[in-house]
Amino acid sequence: MERRSNTGFPSRRSLWIAFLLAPATIIMLAFVVWPLLSAFQLSFYRFDGLKPGEFVWFENFYKVLFQWPFAEATYNALWHNVVVFFTLMVLENGVALLIAYALLKEMPAHRVHQVIIFLPVVLSAVIVGFLWKLLLHPLFGAVNAALGLFGIMGPAWLGNESTALGSIVFANIWHWIGFPTLVLLAGMQRISREVLEAARLDGAGDWTILTRIVWPLIAPSVTIVTILTFIGAFNWFELPFVMADMEGSPAHSTDVLALYFYRTAFGSITSGIQDFGQGSALAVLMFILVAVITFFALRFLRSREIEI
Amino acid sequence: MTLGKHARRILLGGIALGMLASSPAFAGELTFWTWRQEDKATYQEIFKDFTAKNPDITVKVEPLPDNTYPTQVATGLAAGKGADVIQTHAYGWLEQFVKANYFEPLDKTNVPNLANFGPDALSALSFRGDGKVYSLPYATMTLGLFVNKDVFEKAGLTPPTTWDEFITVSKALKEKGIIPLANGLGTSWFNEMFVSAFTGPFLGPDFAAKLSKGETTYKDPLYAGALSRLLELRDYMPPNFEGVDYETAGQLFLTGRAAMLAGGSFDIANYRQLNPAINMDFIAPPAKQAGDPPRPSTFFDGGYAVNAASPNKADALKLVNWMGSPEFGNKFSNMLGNISPIQGVDIKDPILHHVADMNKTSMPHLNVVYFRFAKPTGSELIQANITKMMSGEIKPEQVGAAMTDGIATWFEPFKGK
């Protein structure tokens, strides 16, 4: 391939490629790489006020990982991220798999259903958060009004420690279920019809086809869905922020790492204190956690993929 | 070369765009940042008086979103693009900006009108490190009890003044199908005010003074006793009160579905605007016993600071000095419906006038005034723990212990207690 012209200068073609790549590269450098490096740098400084003070090595990391009460808040938030991830894997992606299979079978009105299921995905998380906050309102919400028809007094969904996180996860599933459905459906549509028909001729039922034939053959789609769910669950911010405020109310029962990081770094109405050092340490830890686990998960998931 | 031309055009376009985005204020024009979007028009109106006296200086009011205000102000100041005059909160909020040298110290030479303020107001907006004032105080906020007079009248009841009366009246209201108290626990910052309003009369200013010096802590049985009173309120709050947020509580009160609401004087003007027909009053929270002086909790909400890097510092100081005059204080109190701490201000509104009277025997809003200087702040601790206590998960003594231990991580006088 021509890389350099005879004169030793870059050819017009390479310059053109560089020019086309430049905007994306500049944006990535300015808004991803630079803030990431800044966060790494700031995490080593003690902040007393809004400017970095003394260089304190790993003090901020020590505080958020081992020192009460910050460490307690970190592990509480991390635990919620883990719960959210597994709940989404089972409920959101599990149901999405069943819906995708139903859509694959092209039952009557499947196209309409496909649109309906995907529709909430195009809404912003802020709108979805407000919508569900209204639907789950403890006094005037539609959900409790519907329960009232059956003589049941619905709880304060977002006000009880036992129901708040589950309610937000439910809203998240409603919002996002169309996405894994579409990805898994696309994976299923790549499977040769002959394979499915042969299985059916051999007397395999839907459950056998789904678990023995479809599931192994959509491994690449499952990899994508799993990784995106993992990244989404560990960077979860908008919905809890809108539905449960920056404090992860009530009593931090909906706190997740991104919320904890945000209010540590930027302060909140409540605390009024900002600590970029400790906040940056949390951000760095989140980055390492997501990057490392994603790397190993990808290697594992890729290894079980089969070329169709 | 074509590429070169393109690149140059893009570069020039970018520079032009950058210049547009950061267009500076015109000479003689001061910029003013506030998080109070709703006050923009009133501030603009008030600043016309300043311009009338100083024809060469105009003021441009630029409100920023309240939930990201500290972040935006910090970012703006760090980038050297902050407004000339900036509305600030008080106490710990202000200190973090002062420590970064973002604000100009104020004294009686550059702001002679500081003489119009009492020592409490000035100390709320001073840096503990050097004792200097960095922001000119603008409002005293009072936590008390909103009462809907029409609801009380219809029910044939009188608003309560003592705790026992409060319980008796609440029982009677509940029997008539009226929610006695609109408050819920769905909004963290409002929960803290709810706690302060009702516990204040049981704690008193002596406890506050001792607490501020570490002579006592939140482990004091007096505090647990005051908190345990809140548990009695659960029967008189709305159904599902755990999820009733600040906005819903306001709606319940304004529509007459609830008779009372523990809240802040900052909402008097707001509630009047939302329901101009409401016949309400703002009274002291229920006293421990008959004959006790009114004990609302108060705090200084904030002030007006001068950006230390402002190119128009002299004009900015002139404006801030004017904002410390009784002329501004009168307009502020009467147009924005808040109590100005400027001495000599004549508050015309009867409710605000009454609140200003109550404030003479008030006590401090404890965590905001004393324990918002480092993490974990007293506010964070009470907000998370109070919902646990009200749901029965923990006892009042455990709330006091958690708060003391949390604050002790940075407040020396609490260490080991």
Image (tube, coloured by chain):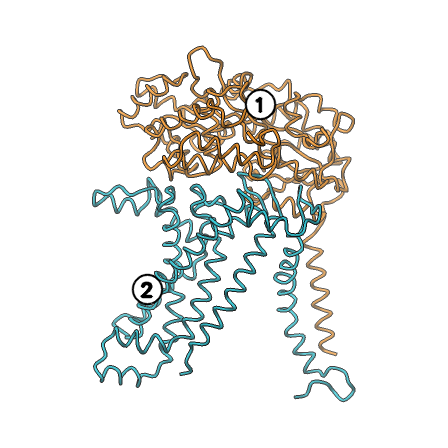
Chain colours: A cyan, B orange
Amino acid residing under circle 1: Glu
Amino acid residing under circle 2: Val
Nearest the camera: B222 or B366? B222
**Label 1: element kind:** loop
Label 2 chain ID:
A
Kindly indicate the quadrant of the structure image that contains residue A34.
bottom right
Question: Which residue bears the numbered disc 2?
Answer: A95
Kindly indicate the quadrant of the structure image that contains residue B38.
top right
Q: What x and y, as percent, mark residue A190?
A: 38, 80
Nearest the camera: A286 or B161? A286
Q: Is residue A218 above or below residue B163?
A: below
Q: Look at the image and tell me in which quarter the C terminus of chain B lies.
A: top right
Label 1 chain ID:
B
Kindly indicate the quadrant of the structure image that contains residue B84.
top right
Q: Relative to residue B223, is residue B336 drawn left or right?
A: right
Please tell me how crowded label 2 is: few (under 14), some (14-19), or many (20+) other residues with Cα within 10 Å: some
**Label 2: element kind:** helix
Both marks 2 and 1 on one chain: no
Q: Relative to residue B310, is residue A153 drawn left or right?
A: left
Question: Which residue bears the numbered disc 1?
Answer: B215
Q: Relative to residue A155, is residue A297 drawn left or right?
A: right
Q: Are marks 2 and 1 in contact (CB under 8 Å)?
A: no
Q: Nearer the viewer, mark 2 or mark 1?
A: 1
Q: Residue furthest front?
A: B416
Q: Is residue A180 above or below residue B317?
A: below
- Residue at 70% over, 73% down: B6
Q: Relative to residue A74, is residue B24 drawn left or right?
A: right
Nearest the camera: B196 or A86? A86
Please tell me how crowded label 1 is: few (under 14), some (14-19), or many (20+) other residues with Cα within 10 Å: few
Q: Is residue A120 above or below residue B222?
A: below
Q: What x and y, as percent, mark residue A203?
A: 21, 81
Mark 2 and mark 1: span between their CA atoms? Answer: 59 Å
